[in-house]
């Protein structure tokens, strides 16, 4: 592979990089150091990777991003995160199910248990599989709370 280097830095980029080299954010510091070592020290990517303790591909990636976007390319992009496992329609159906009585589904209970709610949600094909803990989280996220029912034994 042919060597990759950072383009010539402007004065404002140099001052910005100096600020980033004092950053508490480790990732940002390492990215700035990669650019600094490439631009000022004129080191090759494998040497930088060894010094900064990053993979060679990451070093090349940061150099390319800096060459394309400047200092803004060193900052981390916001990510959307993991997609929801249960869609809104499914959540609405689970809440409708929660508002019905368990006796309508042939259960011998007067109130829902998490296991019972999961079993009926799977049986009615609202969802393929769900654990009681995840069901509790879904219910809680929708503004409902689940509390275990308590049984009282009283003597006559």
Image: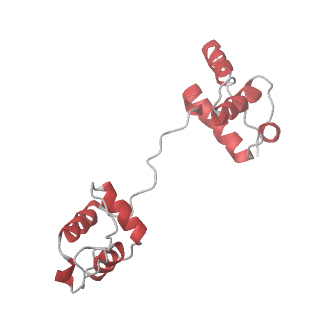
Question: On the image, which quarter does residue 96 sit in?
Answer: bottom left
Question: On the image, which quarter does residue 45 sit in?
Answer: top right
Display coloring? secondary structure
Identify the residue at image location x=51%, y=39%: 77
Residue 56 picture location, percent across and down: 74, 45
- In front of the other: 21 or 105: 105
Image position of 105 (left or right of 57) = left
Rendered position, 51 above or below 72: below
Residue 98 picture location, percent across and down: 23, 69
Identify the residue at image location x=30%, y=59%: 145
- In front of the other: 141 or 63: 141
Question: On the image, which quarter does residue 115 sit in?
Answer: bottom left
The count of marks equals: 0
- In front of the other: 128 or 148: 148
Identify the residue at image location x=39%, y=72%: 130
Rendered position, 94 above or below 84: below
Q: Residue furthest front?
A: 156
Residue 75 picture location, percent across and down: 56, 33
- In front of the other: 118 or 2: 118
Residue 99 picture location, percent across and down: 18, 68
Q: Quadrant of the C terminus?
A: bottom left
């Amino acid at each position: 592979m042919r060597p990759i280097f950072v383009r010539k830095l402007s004065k404002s980029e140099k001052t910005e990089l100096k600020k980033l080299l004092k950053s508490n954010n480790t990732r940002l510091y390492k990215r700035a150091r990669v650019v600094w070592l490439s631009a000022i020290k004129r080191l090759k990517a494998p040497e930088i990777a060894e010094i900064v303790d990053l993979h060679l591909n990451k070093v090349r990636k940061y150099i390319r991003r800096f060459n394309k976007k400047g200092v803004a390319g060193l900052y981390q992009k916001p990510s959307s995160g993991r997609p929801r496992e249960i869609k809104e329609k499914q959540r609405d159906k689970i809440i409708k199910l929660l508002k019905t009585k368990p006796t309508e589904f042939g259960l011998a209970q007067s109130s829902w248990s998490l296991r019972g709610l999961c079993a009926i949600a799977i049986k009615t094909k609202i969802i393929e599989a769900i654990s009681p803990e995840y069901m509790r989280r879904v219910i809680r996220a929708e503004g409902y709370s689940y509390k275990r029912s308590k049984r009282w034994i009283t003597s006559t």
